[in-house]
């Protein structure tokens, strides 16, 4: 057996959560997941689009609805496939269809 095939593949956050919770992986793959680091950073998994983006509000589209992140000095980083990182001073997070500044 080669050295590469002996190394274990690192599991994704969704795979780890499915293993821990017993919830089916197929169901978790369409759920948005957030990993918050205090009020300064959010790693967001499950993003399918960006609906609104400025330094006080970021509204993300997910397979299960919209998610609004509000605060000051917000900016996006590391947008890869379905995950991204939001930095800044995060004051609130709202889920649902009616998120945005006009609500």
Image (tube, grey):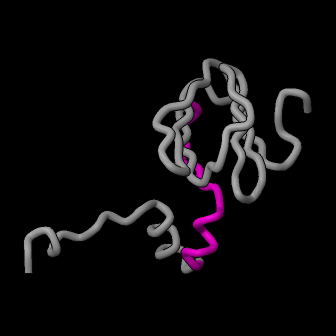
Q: Residue 102 location, x and y as percent?
A: 90, 28
| Viewer-closest of 2 and 66 | 2
Residue shown at 59% from the left, 77% from the top: 23
Q: Position of residue 75 (x, y in %)?
A: 57, 25
Q: Is residue 99 left or right of residue 79?
A: right
- Which residue is drawn at the image coordinates 72% and 27% (left, top)? 57
Residue 76 in which image quadrant: top right
Image quadrant in which the C terminus is located: top right
Q: Please state, as top left, top right, bottom left or bottom right, where the N terminus lies in the image.
A: bottom left
Q: In the rendered structure, which segment of residues is drawn in magenta?
A: 24-40
Q: Is residue 2 left or right of residue 83?
A: left
* Residue with the most extreme right position: 103
47 magenta-colored: no
State the residue lying farthest toward the left. 2
Q: Quick one: 43 or 79, which is closer to the camera?
A: 79
Q: Residue drawn at (64%, 50%), measured in percent from left and top?
A: 48
């Amino acid at each position: 057996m080669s050295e590469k095939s002996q190394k274990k593949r690192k599991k994704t956050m969704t795979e780890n959560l499915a293993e821990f919770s017993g919830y089916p992986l197929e169901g978790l793959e369409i759920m948005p997941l957030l990993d918050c680091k205090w009020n300064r950073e959010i790693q967001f998994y499950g993003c399918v689009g960006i609906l609104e983006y400025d330094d006080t509000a970021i509204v993300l589209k997910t397979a299960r609805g919209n998610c609004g992140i509000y605060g000051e000095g917000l900016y996006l980083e590391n947008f890869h496939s379905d995950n991204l990182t939001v930095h800044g001073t995060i004051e609130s997070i709202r889920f649902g269809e009616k998120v945005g500044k006009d609500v």
